[in-house]
Amino acid sequence: MQVDEDVAAWSDGLDELFGRVAGRFFRAEPRRRARAYVSGLLAPLAGKNGWTLAEVAGDRSPDGMQRLLNAASWDADGVRDDLRSYAVEHLGAPGGVLIVDETGFLKKGTKSAGVQRQYCGTAGRIENCQLGVFLAYATTKGRTLIDRELYLPKSWIADPARRGEAAVPEQAEFATKAVLAQRMLARALDAGVPAGWVAADEAYGQDYKFRTWCEHRKIGYVVAVPRSQSVPLPRDAGFSFSSRRVDDLVAQAPEQA
């Protein structure tokens, strides 16, 4: 059956991919468990949590999965780099797009790294959540995520005891979400990811430092901005002002623009 063939192909592909990142795990046990964890995430389960993922892996309890996520030693950034290279090999194209976006993860407790009451786009309101900034790569061949950064609010940076309890590195410093996006873009560009431009919503587009950073890196960008955003104008634009609001410029644009 076609379904069985597809499942077999996915399994073989996953084996190949984990063979590629095997050196990033310092012991065989967490490497095997990570393989089982990803298989569980790809499985057609009604709900995915520690118990259901452990069941798919053949474990009696979720303890092993919890150890993988909370205590096992492995080079997460190295795996990230390997996966980015894998994605480029299969999807890379000169006109690729690097897409920045964030998402929130709703939480009930206060122990998860970076959690606090803050605006959560997932819920559309202020909620107790974590925020992650992500970088996706898209071409005519497909699309995938290639990087991630966890946003740590200032309240977390100012609380060493809380950071220690959540295993946040001592050297962690506050960074805005736009700066986190720049770090991911820099890693992608420095690694040679073929891309023609960057796309982002107004959370990043309204930050002139983010736009300026893209210009300095000589990468084009298409970003949303608030209608009240002022943008600089070239000297020969025929305006008496050095900058104008976006909505004013749109209102004066010719119909065929």
Image (cartoon, grey):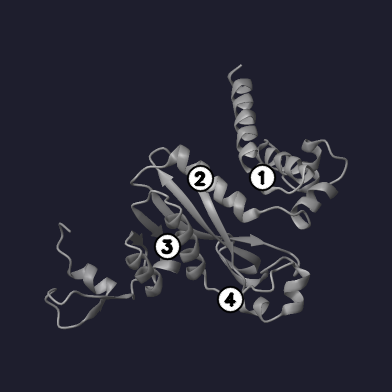
Q: Position of residue 112 (x, y in %)?
A: 72, 65
Q: Residues within 10 Å of mark 3 (few under 14, many from 20)?
A: some
Q: Could you give the CA–CA distance between mark 2 and mark 1, rounded to whole angstroms?
A: 15 Å
Q: Are marks 4 and 1 in contact (CB under 8 Å)?
A: no
Q: Mark 2 vs mark 3: give the one in front.
A: 2
- Of the pair 89 and 96, the residue shown nearer to us: 89
Q: Could you give the CA–CA distance between mark 4 and mark 1, rounded to whole angstroms?
A: 31 Å
Q: Mark 1 vs mark 3: give the one in front.
A: 1
Q: In the rendered view of the protein, which quadrant contains the C terminus?
A: bottom left
Which badge, 4 or 2, comes first in the chain's sequence? 2
Residue sitting at x 39%, y 74%: 209
Q: Which residue is under mark 1? A: 23
Which badge, 4 or 3, comes first in the chain's sequence? 4
Furthest-right residue in this view: 60
Q: Which residue is under mark 2? A: 85
Q: Which residue is under mark 4? A: 174
Can you say whether 84 is above or below 125 in the image?
Answer: above
Q: Mark 4 vs mark 3: give the one in front.
A: 4
Q: Mark 4 vs mark 2: give the one in front.
A: 2
Q: Position of residue 217 (x, y in %)?
A: 35, 64
Which badge, 4 or 1, comes first in the chain's sequence? 1
Q: Are marks 1 and 3 in contact (CB under 8 Å)?
A: no
Q: Residues within 10 Å of mark 4 (few under 14, many from 20)?
A: some
Which badge, 2 or 3, comes first in the chain's sequence? 2
